[in-house]
Amino acid sequence: MSLTQDDVKRIARLARIEIDDVQAQATQAQLNTIFDLIATMQAVDTHGIAPMAHAQEVYQRLRDDTVTETDRHAAFQAIAPAVENGLYLVPKVIE
Amino acid sequence: MSEASLSALAAQLASKQISSRELAQQYLGRIAALNPSINAFITVDAEKTLREAAAADALIAAGQAGPLTGVPIAHKDIFCTDGWLTTCGSKMLSNFVAPYDAHVIQRFKAAGMPSLGKTNMDEFAMGSSNETSHFGAVKNPWNPSYVPGGSSGGAAACVAARMAPAATGTDTGGSIRQPAALCGITGLKPTYGLVSRYGMIAFASSLDQAGPMAPSAEDCALLLNVMTGFDPNDSTSLEREKEDYTRDLDKPLNGLRVGLPREFFAEGLNSEVAAAVEAAVNELKKLGATTVEISLANSQLAIPVYYVLAPAEASSNLSRFDGVRYGYRAPEYGNLDDMYGKTRAQGFGAEVKRRIMIGAYVLSHGYYDAYYLQAQKIRRLIADDFNEAFKACDVILGPTAPGTAFKLGEKSDDPVEMYLNDLYTIPANLAGLPGMSLPCGFDAKGLPIGLQLVGNYFSEAKMLNVAHQYQRATDWHSRQPEGLK
């Protein structure tokens, strides 16, 4: 398989990474060599093999339903790009 | 001082021959002299280091010292460190001062070990040469025209140049072992789940694991005693009895069965590396080990499988970098979507963007089964190969990397060529097994060669035993780069 320029732009859009035509062209060539490498696994017969998501068979632990976090919003918001009145500022999304 | 093992440094501190402050000052002096040419550290803050050292001296004076109290250590810049710049090697976090400590940092602080600073790394731990760092490439202390390996390249280089007696690293596909090999030091990636990932900036969560990097296996055992342990803040942290990883160091190797995977000695392996690894096998035989040929037939698929799974997990993990809550935000933008797109285009480097895009693609509608699910199934086959192999042997041995260090710039334009460097290290990450690298010789150019050990789950003490016995019989691990002594 081979990615087209349009594929690359669609993927970049999915990943929320702005990309121009020149970058898309360079990226297309590199991604295609990587996908050629990845394609070698397609030949393997994996019929009946259970997928392995994780190295350890662990289950999510439950904890007591009690408050464990303290309010540290001032420390966390001190490092944010734009904050006002305890709120994170972003461009307007609702007219 | 730069010759001393961690246990020797701890003994000098305990007997008050030297204070933690004096020790920290010596290492800070060496960093000031060598770091401008090696670039192993992103952040050094002598004032903070000396304050932590003074606190360690107070503990020692009060008789409350632990085994490594007062011994300084350098931390990879992937660990959130309260009040320290924590960049993960990226422009995206170039202004990020962490508001809390990673669990690993908490443990070293509780052990009374002052931090010497934050070490350079490939951006978001994605790389095998340290050339993808936003803060510039790290130079290999054995020859500054060569790479130190990656992604924990700053950690490996600072230990090799004795700018720190030890360092922390993380390993997703070889990022502790490969730089340890290329810089001639010892590094261990523990069994997945032994060291908490809390506060360790995530790359591929099902593979990421932190571990120690130091000159010797004995040092690594002492560091592992500090690093490991259950943490409720990491949902994959394992609840296990606390182990003493130094307990088996002095055991003889009589009867040890060493498995040699034929796939790790096949085409693609540099002949000088092969010869050094074979010499190490002979050394272990002299110490009482026997060898058995094994097969890890599916290990050849490890790279394609990894380059589906790791980018898939990365594309999800790195979606948090959006310019809203912390880190970089593009200076100019229109609407919210435009802010995301520009922030991420400007904040991430080329390799990180490539991997996010691979991940977004393999997880996208219509491709999930062919890529992600297929890769997960082959991951099972790779893990099953190891399970079968460990019926016939106690530890698996082979090269850490297919060659020695390569020149800066030599592979940076060819992602696939770069990826092939992790051919022998990735299988252990996919299976979740512990792996380590230790020095076993030099090539004709004087660059270090690394030997890899892969053990069964939770067999770190056995691996450290093998490595320690080998290091008692050889002196590769105590060699230091000429000119930096």
Image: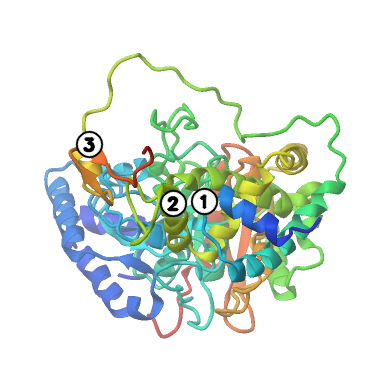
Q: Residue drawn at (53%, 59%), measured in percent from left and top?
A: B352
Residue B427 in sight: no
* Chain hosting mark 2: B
Q: Which mark is residue A73?
A: 3
Look at the numbered discs 3 and 2 and tell me whether their residues touch, using CB distance below 8 Å: no
Amino acid marked by disc 1: Arg
Q: Secondary structure at mark 3?
A: helix
Q: Residues within 10 Å of mark 2 (few under 14, many from 20)?
A: many
Specify whether B436 is left or right of B481.
Answer: right
- Disc 1 from disc 2: Cα separation: 6 Å
Amino acid marked by disc 3: His
Locate residue B322, reporting x and y percent.
Answer: 41, 49
Q: Dot 1 corresponds to which residue?
A: A16
* Residue B345 to residue B458: above or below: below
Q: Residues within 10 Å of mark 1 (few under 14, many from 20)?
A: many
* Chain hosting mark 3: A
Q: Secondary structure at mark 1?
A: loop
Q: Dot 2 corresponds to which residue?
A: B340
Look at the numbered discs 1 and 2 and tell me whether their residues touch, using CB distance below 8 Å: yes
* Residue B210 to residue B12: above or below: above
